[in-house]
Image (cartoon, rainbow, N blue to C red):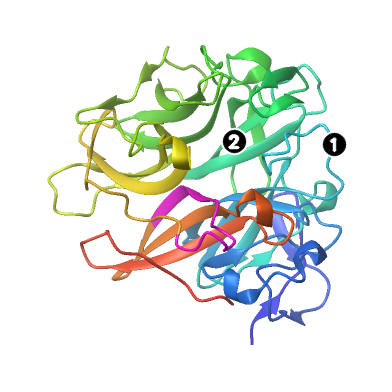
C-alpha cells in the first residue's frame, strides 16, 4: 500500500513523526486550489502542489531527482511557492522556497517536512542586501567528494521594468549551498553581488544553472536572459577549489547551428556522462526555445554531445520531447530536463506548466516520461496516478 509520511528534519538526522496514512488517489496534487483539475489532463505529472499550509501548496517548480545509494531511495529537491508567499514575488515564476521529497521507485513521492517555515529546507536570506533575499529556486543538485552541492538561484527586492511588467525579484543570480546529507544546507558565499557566484552580465538575469564535476574542476552553466526576454544564452564558469573562486566565464560554444528550433536559444539543461555509442564524452539534455512569432518561446527538449564540456553539437535534428496536449497541465511548455538511466529504461524528468488560460485550473509541477533503447527520440508520459 502506498503511504505518505510526515518527516521532521533534526540537524543532520531524519526522524519520523506522526502516523503513517494512506496516500490519496490524487497524491501528486494535494493542494485544494487544484481539487477540480481533470485527471485526464494530468498525464505525466508525478509531483504537483502539496497540502494546504505547506510551502508548496500554491505552485511547485523545477524538481531535481537523484538516486541516493546510501539511503536506498530517490530524493527530489524542488522549489515551490505557498499561498503565504509575498505579493511582490514575480508572478510568472513559482520560486520562493525549496523543499524535498523521497521515493522508493522515483515515481510515487512522499513530501518531507523541513525545519524551515511551512516545511521548507531552504528559504530566502533574512539579509536584504543578499542576492537571494526575496526568493530562491534551484535547477540542479550534484554529489561529489562525499557531499551534495545545490546549484540554486535567488532574487532580491530590486524593482525592474520588464516585458512582464514592473516587478521585484527578476534580477536573479546563481548561488551555491552544500550539505552532508542532502537535507540540512549551508550557503556558500560567492564573489558576485550579494554573495552570488556570478553577476547578470548584460542580461536581465543569470539563473537556472547546473553543474558538472570533471577533471578536478566544477563547470557551472548559467542561463543569461536578454533584457527584453527575446533570447537566452549559456555562460560557463569553472572552479578548482569547490566553489570558493570562479573563472571569468565564457559562452557555451555551438559547433553547428545555434539551438532553439527557430532561434531563441537554450534555457535550462543537465549534463551526464554519455552512455550512447556516439564517440562523445558528455550528453546534455536542454530546453530549446522556439523564436517563431506564432509560437514565441515554445519550449521543447533536445540533446547535444561534447568532448570538452565547452563546445557542443546537436545529437538529433529535432527535439526529443514536446508539448503533447495544449489543454493539459504541461500544455504551456516543458523545461528543465533531467535524464536518468534506470536499468534498460531511460527516464526524462521535467518541469511542466499550463497555458495561461488554464493557470488557475491546472497545476505546475514535475513530470516523467519513459524511453528505452539507444534511440532517445521517443518518450512516453507516464499515466496519471
Q: Nearer the viewer, mark 2 or mark 1?
A: 1
- Residue 344 location in percent, x, y? 28, 71
Residue at x 78%, y 57% (from the top left corner)? 57
Secondary element at image label 1: loop
Q: Is residue 365 magenta?
A: no
Farthest residue, direction bottom: 1
Secondary element at image label 2: strand
- Rounded to the nearest angstrom, the CA distance separating label 2 from label 1 is 22 Å
Q: Quadrant of the C terminus?
A: bottom right
Residue 283 in view, yes or no: no
Q: Is residue 92 left or right of residue 267?
A: right
The residue lying toward the viewer, choosing from 367 and 164, is 164
- Residue 250 location in percent, x, y? 36, 17
125 vs 68: above or below: above
Identify residue for label 1: 87
Farthest residue, direction front: 294
Q: Are marks 2 and 1 in contact (CB under 8 Å)?
A: no
Q: Is residue 336 magenta?
A: yes
Residue 89's image quarter? top right
Residue at x 80%, y 62% (from the top left corner)? 33
Residue at x 57%, y 67% (from the top left corner)? 46
- Residue 163 location in percent, x, y? 63, 25
Q: Quadrant of the N terminus?
A: bottom right
- Residue 17 location in percent, x, y? 81, 69
Identify residue for label 2: 152
Residue 31 in view, yes or no: yes
149 vs 360: above or below: above
Residue extent of the magenta highlight: 324-339
Amino acid at each position: 500500500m502506498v503511504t505518505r509520511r510526515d518527516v521532521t528534519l533534526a540537524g543532520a538526522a531524519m526522524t519520523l513523526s506522526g502516523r503513517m496514512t494512506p496516500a490519496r488517489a490524487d497524491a501528486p496534487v494535494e493542494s485544494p486550489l487544484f481539487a477540480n483539475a481533470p485527471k485526464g489532463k494530468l498525464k505525466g505529472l508525478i509531483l504537483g502542489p502539496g497540502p494546504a499550509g505547506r510551502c508548496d501548496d500554491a505552485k511547485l517548480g523545477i524538481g531535481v531527482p537523484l538516486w541516493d545509494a546510501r539511503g536506498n531511495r530517490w530524493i527530489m529537491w524542488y522549489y515551490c511557492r505557498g499561498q503565504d508567499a509575498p505579493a511582490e514575488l514575480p508572478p510568472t515564476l513559482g520560486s520562493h522556497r525549496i523543499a524535498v521529497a523521497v521515493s522508493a521507485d522515483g515515481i510515487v513521492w512522499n513530501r518531507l517536512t523541513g525545519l524551515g517555515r511551512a516545511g521548507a529546507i531552504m528559504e530566502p536570506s533574512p539579509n536584504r542586501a543578499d542576492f537571494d533575499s526575496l526568493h530562491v529556486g534551484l535547477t540542479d543538485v550534484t554529489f561529489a567528494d562525499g557531499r551534495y552541492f545545490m546549484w540554486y538561484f535567488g532574487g532580491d527586492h530590486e524593482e525592474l521594468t520588464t516585458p512582464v511588467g514592473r516587478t521585484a525579484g527578476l534580477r536573479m543570480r546563481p548561488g551555491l549551498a552544500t550539505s552532508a546529507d542532502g537535507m540540512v544546507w549551508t550557503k556558500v558565499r560567492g564573489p558576485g553581488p550579494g554573495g552570488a557566484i556570478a553577476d547578470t552580465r548584460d542580461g536581465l538575469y543569470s539563473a537556472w544553472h547546473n553543474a558538472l564535476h570533471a577533471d578536478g574542476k566544477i563547470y557551472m552553466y548559467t542561463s543569461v536572459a536578454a533584457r527584453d526576454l527575446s533570447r537566452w544564452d549559456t555562460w560557463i564558469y569553472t572552479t578548482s577549489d569547490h566553489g570558493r573562486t570562479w573563472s571569468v566565464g565564457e559562452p557555451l560554444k555551438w559547433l553547428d547551428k545555434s539551438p532553439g528550433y527557430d532561434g531563441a536559444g537554450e534555457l535550462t539543461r543537465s549534463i551526464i556522462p554519455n552512455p550512447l555509442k556516439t564517440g562523445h564524452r558528455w550528453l546534455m539534455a536542454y530546453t530549446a526555445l522556439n523564436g517563431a512569432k506564432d509560437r514565441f518561446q515554445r519550449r521543447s527538449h533536445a540533446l547535444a554531445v561534447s568532448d570538452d564540456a565547452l563546445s557542443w553539437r546537436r545529437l538529433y535534428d529535432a527535439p526529443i520531447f514536446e508539448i503533447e496536449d495544449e489543454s493539459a497541465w504541461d500544455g504551456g511548455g516543458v523545461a528543465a530536463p533531467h535524464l536518468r538511466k534506470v536499468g534498460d529504461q531511460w527516464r526524462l524528468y521535467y518541469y511542466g506548466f499550463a497555458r495561461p488560460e488554464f493557470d488557475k485550473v491546472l497545476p505546475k509541477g514535475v513530470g516523467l516520461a519513459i524511453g528505452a533503447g539507444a534511440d532517445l527520440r521517443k518518450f512516453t508520459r507516464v499515466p496519471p496516478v
